[in-house]
Image (cartoon, helix red, strand yellow):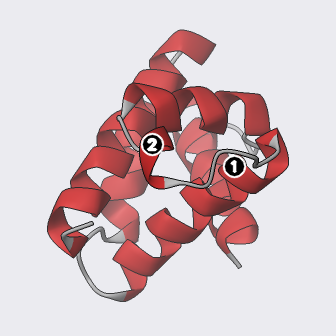
Amino acid sequence: MGDAYLNFAYSLARSLREGKPKSLRVANRVLMEAVRKAGLRRKLPSRLSRKDIGGAAEALLVYASARGFLPLGVLVERLAEAGSEEELVEALSGLLMEAARRLKI
């Protein structure tokens, strides 16, 4: 569920930013970097694959959204601000930190 939710939010954000429909995916490499940058990697088991770390990031974001701590509109707004991959990592990192803080992780 987290994968579909985040890719939907990212596609919507880029579609709004560029003014035309987009169907995009957030790479696990980008998610892994965002998890590291957010300081959350140490909270995960040491022997996880890039895919598993990406899945954990997606799960955290969708859970925070489901609990009402990170509405879809906020997620889309922050992702729409990211024009480059580096900015996407930065946006996701901030969203992950906010989700972790609000969920007291």
In percent of the image, x 75 and y 29: which residue is there? 29
User: What residue occupies the far front of the structure in this picture?
Assistant: 46
The answer to which of 75 and 86 lies nearer the viewer is 86
State the residue position of label 2. 42
Taking the spot 68% from the left edge, 49% from the top edge, the residue there is 53
Answer left or right for 60 relative to 29: left
Looking at the image, which residue is at 48% across and 66% down? 60
> In front here: 45 or 21?
45
Q: Position of residue 48 (x, y in %)?
A: 76, 49
Could you tell me how many numbered marks the image carries? 2
Instruction: Return the mark for residue 54.
Output: 1
The amino acid pointed to by label 2 is: Arg
Give the crowd class for mark 2: few <14, some 14-19, many >=20 residues within 10 Å: few
From this view, report whether residue 29 is shown above or below residue 13: above
The answer for how far apart the CA atoms under marks 2 and 1 are is: 14 Å
The relative height of residue 4 versus residue 94 in the rendered view (above or below) is: below
Going by the picture, which residue comes out furthest to the bottom?
67
Where does the image place residue 21, in percent across and percent down from the top left?
75, 45
Q: Secondary structure at mark 2?
A: helix
